[in-house]
Image (cartoon, rainbow, N blue to C red):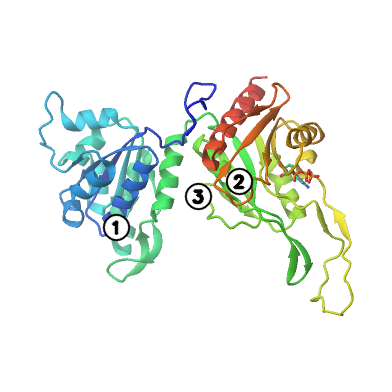
Amino acid sequence: MNEELVSESGHSHMGILNEKRILLGVCGSVAAFKAVALASQLNQAGAEVTTILTKDAARFVTPLSFTSVTQRPAYVDLYTPDPGRILHVALAEEADLLAVIPATANTLARMAQGLSDDLLACTYLSTRAPVLVAPAMDGGMYTNAATQASLATLRDSGVHVVEPLEGRAASGLVAKGRMPEVDALIAEIRTVLGRNGPLAGKTVVVTAGGTQEPLDPVRYIGNRSSGKMGFALAEAARDCGARVVLIQAATTAPPPLGMTTVSVTTAAEMQAAVNEHAAQADALIMAGAVADYRPETARSQKTKRTGDPLAIRLVENEDILAGVPRTLVKVGFAAETDDVLRNAEKKLTSKGADLIFANDVSRPDSGFGADTNQVVVLSNARPPEPLPLMAKSEVAAVILERVSGLVRERSEK
Ligand code: CTP
């Protein structure tokens, strides 16, 4: 990432996982193999992952698997010599998060009862960091009153419990108890790390994807939006601690997790959803590619070929962003192919927006479907600020920092 890109607060604009010290507690479950993939992805996102395996976990996966993917220690034994410090106390103090993934019935029970019979249990008792557990076990064990009592005790003491899924367990039983996949676990970890962020207690509405305007039951007018930028913004808002309402039209990218999602098809549906949710929101970020026109009538039957030219009359859709009151922070994008700055500046005024992020969609690295974006920030307060070409997730982090600042200013007024 570009070293010049340092935020107003002096921190670099990287994802929430960057430089976070995550203690990964791994228990003896068949799902332990997923913990290796999880550790690898956390490491790639910049987190410093230290692993603690229970002795049963070490029967399923080895400490070497974790040290290999994290380049950091993986411990099993409570009495591992660690000169000059007491291992479980030091690990507990250093952690930004303790994530027990997978968590077995046995370890959940030991944690709930405050036992201190291995390194993971002692570290759990010692730490003041937030704690997340992802139970993984057969449905019978999960629904058993004893396991549910352990989980209730842990929830009461502030532990974040990742709900297991219904699914097929290794035993062949189909029941609730299957651990979610790595992407979902990462979304939960990011949510816990961000919970006290600058948008804690605030609601942010984000639109993503392209609207589709029906011509007849089988055809529509659409656009090339992938939803990637909107999804990155929704994730960045969630990582800042916001409650996120994602209003999603047609997309091709995998949707983000850990937020309320509302699916819409047309511009009119998107407008209705935005108006409904913006009423309780602190900020609206319109990353959705809204069709400016829709066919005047959507035929109820499939249009047949006639051999003659076909004219379709289009009527204008309302401007969603312009129609939202200025009481909340309003952010838009200006997707332009020419005269980018002048066109984008006009949108700042005509839409009553607080911020417009202008991008030249004719560039291959900045347009629809790309993983990167190069934007210029336009606001009422400052001259245009071009940002370097960055990953959409990094652009999203910059945008959310600006949005957080404006939301804070509004609430102080
Ligand atoms: N937008 C909106 N409602 C519309 C059209 C666009 O809220 N009916 C929002 C978009 O989500 C974006 C911003 O307005 O955040 C600018 O979108 P853009 O397509 O660049 O601008 P338009 O207003 O459609 O103007 P034009 O297509 O003429 O450039």
Would you name the residue on which mark 1 appears?
Answer: 31
Would you name the residue on which mark 2 appears?
Answer: 230
Along the viewing direction, whichever of 400 and 119 lies nearer the viewer: 400
Mark nearest the camera among 1 and 2 is: 2
User: In the picture shown, does residue 361 fall above or below 129?
Assistant: below
User: In the picture shown, does residue 280 fall above or below 168?
Assistant: above
Name the residue located 51 percent from the left edge and 25 percent from the top edge.
Answer: 4
Name the residue located 55 percent from the left edge and 55 percent from the top edge.
Answer: 253
* Residue 180 figure quarter: bottom left
Ligand 1 shown in quarter? top right
Name the residue located 74 percent from the left edge and 69 percent from the top edge.
Answer: 219
Judge whether residue 116 can be spotted in this image: yes
Q: Is residue 198 left or right of residue 75?
A: right
Judge whether residue 115 can be spotted in this image: no
Q: Which mark is residue 257?
A: 3
Crowding around mark 3 (Cα neighbors within 10 Å: few <14, some 14 to 19, many 20+) is some
Q: CA distance from mark 2 to mark 3?
A: 13 Å
Name the residue located 41 percent from the left edge and 46 percent from the top edge.
Answer: 186
- Of callouts 2 and 3, which one flags the residue occurring earlier in the amino acid sequence? 2
